[in-house]
Image (cartoon, rainbow, N blue to C red):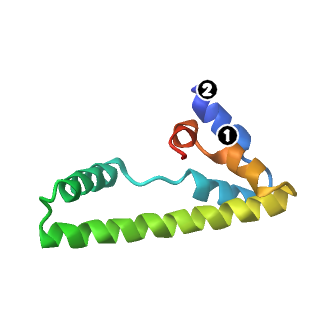
Amino acid sequence: MSLKSHQQQQRYSSNPEENDLLRILQRQLPQEEQVRINYLRQKNENGEITDAEHRELLKYIEKVEERDAERAAALIKLAEIKNVDLATVIEEFTPKEKKANVV
């Protein structure tokens, strides 16, 4: 077992509700969808996107925003369950590479 998967397993608790919240936090888009989003974003930034591609990009954006809202709700609920402030939970469960991109 890799160190990363071991660390992820250690995050799970015996509380089923907490485990459900952790799964929401760890959920990611499939790699092929992420590649497609990146491609469409680049075409959009370059002004080369077609109407059909733009509609597709908007659908992806909506999907990502819905997942972000679910993650936010999961973080809040997890903070309540653990009886800690939200900042502590965010620090614990935000991937290191995302923290570097925060402005």
Kindly identify which residue carries mark 1. 9
**Three-letter amino acid code of the residue under disc 1:** Gln
Sequence-first tag of 1 and 2: 2
Question: CA separation, marks 1 and 2?
Answer: 10 Å
Q: Is residue 17 visible?
A: no
Q: Quadrant of the N terminus?
A: top right
**Residues at marks 1 and 2 touching, judged by CB atoms closer than 8 Å:** no
Residue at x 62%, y 46% (from the top left corner): 94
In the figure, is residue 38 to the left or right of 51? right
The number of discs equals: 2
In the figure, is residue 2 to the left or right of 18? left
Residue at x 72%, y 63% (from the top left corner): 76
Q: In the current view of this chain or complex, which residue is farthest to the right?
A: 83
Q: In the current view of this chain or complex, which residue is farthest to the front?
A: 103
**Three-letter amino acid code of the residue under disc 2:** Leu
Q: Position of residue 78 (x, y in %)?
A: 75, 59
**Tag 2's secondary structure?**
helix
Considering depth in this image, is 30 or 56 the residue closer to the camera?
A: 56
Q: Position of residue 28 (x, y in %)?
A: 47, 52
Q: Position of residue 38 (x, y in %)?
A: 28, 51
**Tag 1's secondary structure?**
helix
Kindly identify which residue carries mark 2. 3
Considering depth in this image, is 20 or 83 the residue closer to the camera?
A: 83
Instruction: From this view, report whether residue 67 is shown above or below residue 96.
Output: below
Q: Position of residue 90 (x, y in %)?
A: 69, 50
Residue at x 59%, y 59% (from the top left corner): 24
In the figure, is residue 36 to the left or right of 72? left
Residue 51, label in figure: none
Instruction: From this view, report whether residue 98 is shown above or below residue 14.
Output: above
Within-10-Å neighbours for mark 2: few <14, some 14–19, many 20+: few
Residue at x 82%, y 63% (from the top left corner): 80
